[in-house]
Every structure is written in structure tokens, then in C-alpha cells.
Amino acid sequence: MYVVLILVAALVIPRSSSTLWALVLVLFLFVFFLVRYVSTTYSMNDTYLKAGRIAGGRRIRLDSINRIEFGSMRELGGTGFIGSWGWRGRMWSPFIGSFDAVYTDAAKGLVVSGEGVPIYISPKDLEGFARELSRRVRSFTGRLPVDVGDPLGSQGMS
């Protein structure tokens, strides 16, 4: 989508001397958001779940996580593509209230609740990431009431 927006901006915005600065600004913003999107990564260590990207991200202490569930941006509410352009990725859902979104796939992801607001992430190996996150969280807290990564636990949203 970012590439399409870059092409549309380059082809549609007139290139007169008075609008050239606007074209450059729009193209710069689209390229910047593309780089942020492509740089999205997820990792875990012994203490934290980290969702990062250029110029932002979030980390949650594993011992504070109390829910791990499957979700999608559509299930969370009418936030859509435009809502994720915010600097921090802070969004709002009628179902869970405020949440952070550090994702690349709006259709399939995990909603992780813990310290602070919940976070929506979309690792490539969704099930494997959920299992490993669950295993690490269970080592601190035991079984969670909603945990899609726990083979013996309860399932989440979908």
C-alpha cells in the first residue's frame, strides 16, 4: 500500500515550482512510513517482549503479561490502515479500549495484555511465537486465563 501511495503521489501531484516542496514532503513521509513498516521486529529475552521499529516500539515485562490471544485489526474495531500511521501506533478499540499497534499484518496477529495498554503484534510465525511467548510467561506466572500459546490452556478471540 505504501508503494502505491508513493506512486500515486509522484504521478498525481503537479510538479510546478510552487508545489514541488509539497510533493517532496509527501514522498518523504510515505517513504519514512514504509521504512518504519519494513523495520518492524519482535523479540523476547528472559525479561521482556519487545516490538520495535525505526523511531518507536514497545516492550512489556514478561511477568506482567496476563492475556495472549489471537486477533485482527478488523476484530478490534474500525481503526483501519490510516489509524496505524500514528507515531506511537496508539489506537482505540470499542472492545479493549486503548492499545498499541506495532504490526505488519492487519489480518492475523496477537493481542498481548500486560503492563500498560495491550499491544497488537503480527509476527511471521504467529503460532510458534505465541507458543514461545506463552512458555516464557508461564515460567513467571503459571497458566493464564486466556493464552492461545498454551497447548493445555484456553483459547482467545478467534
Image: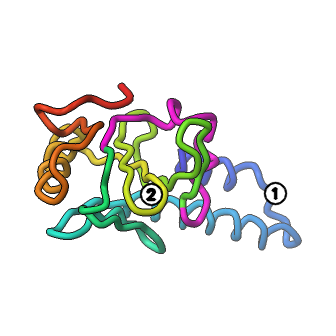
Q: Position of residue 62 (x, y in %)?
A: 25, 62
Q: Is residue 7 visible?
A: no
Residue at 78% across, 67% down: 22
- Seen from the viewer's position, the closer of residues 26 and 123 is 123
Q: Residues within 10 Å of mark 2 (few under 14, many from 20)?
A: some
The kind of residue tagged 1 is Pro
Residue at 30% across, 65% down: 50
Residue 19 image-quadrant placement: bottom right
Residue at 36% across, 49% down: 112
Choose mark 2 or mark 1, whichever is in front.
2
Residue at 58% across, 46% down: 97
- The residue at which mark 1 appears reads as 14
Q: Is residue 67 visible?
A: yes
Q: Position of residue 158 (x, y in %)?
A: 35, 25
Q: Is residue 43 left or right of residue 110?
A: left
- The residue at which mark 2 appears reads as 37
When the figure is inspected, residue 20 is found, relative to residue 129, above or below; the finding is below
The magenta stretch is: 68-88
- Seen from the viewer's position, the closer of residues 109 and 4 is 109
